[in-house]
Image (spheres, grey):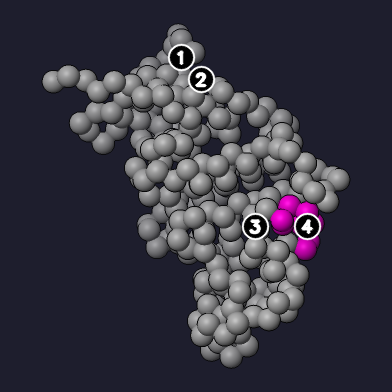
Amino acid sequence: MRRAPAVSDRAFVLRVSPYGDADAVVHLLTERAGVIGALARRARAPSAKRAIVLEPFHTLTVEVQATSGELANLKSATIATARTALLEDPARLDAAGLATRWTRALSPAHVPEPEVFAALERLLDDLAGAAAPIVGVTTPTPVESALTAFGLTLLDVLGYGLDLSGCARCARARPEGRAAYVSGAGGGVACEACRRGAATQAQLVSGALLDRAMHDARSLLSSTAEEVAPLARAVRDAIDMRARAVGARIAP
């Protein structure tokens, strides 16, 4: 049987698991093919050539060869964009790790999601300080604000978006500028009547923040961690619930 040719793509490492004495099973988020699993032969061998780089948070250029089995063959992986600055800040490193776990937990395998890839790349650039300046931001991007913006985008792109324009249960509109309670498990804004009848936790979020997040999640990057904290909790609740629904676990 003729082997399929290796295909070049950009990718992020989501997880690496040892396989045998020297190999590794790698889960990648690729730009064109989505989340895939691949076998990296001799990637863990002490004398292995550095043709396969399995470090997270860098944008990689990979060559992947499809097989008849569940796992592709990872022929090579080299760093296209390095983000070594992430290694210097534990808080930013933790946020990058959480974002990749969210991506792995929620993204279906073998489904191209270029918007997810682009959102993760923007987040990692923001955390590494490599992104273009955000209008109105004169200090380093707040970690929690960047992570919350990414979480909102991830949920929205994958079809789990939080409804911030009105009650997610009864569809009663939220007037512009009005603060509201937001429930991650409930799917978004919860009006007073629906919130009283629900057992899920809801966070009170300012109207101005909800308006901005509804129109452009990345506008949150101009907010402080304190301002975005209630919405951040709702986003985390929503992602945790979706992960449990598909049988995934977001490890600490």
Asked if labels 2 and 1 touch by Cβ distance under 8 angstroms, the answer is yes
Q: Which residues are the magenta region?
A: 219-227
Question: Is residue 218 positioned above or below 87 on the image?
Answer: below
| Mark toward the start of the polypeptide (4 vs 1) | 1
Q: Amino acid at mark 4?
A: Ser
Tell me the distance, in whole angstroms, between the alpha carbons under discs 2 and 4: 35 Å
Tell me the distance, in whole angstroms, between the alpha carbons under discs 3 and 2: 31 Å
Tell me, yes or no, whether the highlighted magenta stretch contains residue 225: yes
Q: Amino acid at mark 3?
A: Ala
Judge from the rendering whether residue 115 lies leftward or rightward of residue 203; answer left or right.
left
Q: Answer with the quarter of the image where residue 174 lies.
A: bottom right
- Residue at position x 77%, y 63% from top? 227
Residue tagged 2: 78
Looking at the picture, tell me which residue is in the foreground, 131 or 180.
131
Q: Answer with the quarter of the image where residue 247 lies.
A: bottom left
Looking at the picture, tell me which residue is in the foreground, 16 or 75.
75
Instruction: Name the mark nearer the viewer: 4 or 1.
Output: 4
Tell me, yes or no, whether the highlighted magenta stretch contains residue 177: no
Mark 3 burial class by Cα count in 10 Å: few <14, some 14-19, many 20+: many
Instruction: Name the mark nearer the viewer: 1 or 3.
Output: 3
Q: Position of residue 155 (x, y in %)?
A: 51, 58
- Residue at position x 52%, y 74% from top? 186
| Mark toward the start of the polypeptide (3 vs 2) | 2
- Residue at position x 65%, y 51% from top? 147
Tell me the distance, in whole angstroms, between the alpha carbons under discs 1 and 2: 7 Å
Q: Amino acid at mark 1?
A: Ala
| Mark toward the start of the polypeptide (2 vs 4) | 2
Residue tagged 1: 51
- Residue at position x 77%, y 46% from top? 134
Q: Amino acid at mark 2?
A: Thr
Instruction: Name the mark nearer the viewer: 3 or 2.
Output: 3
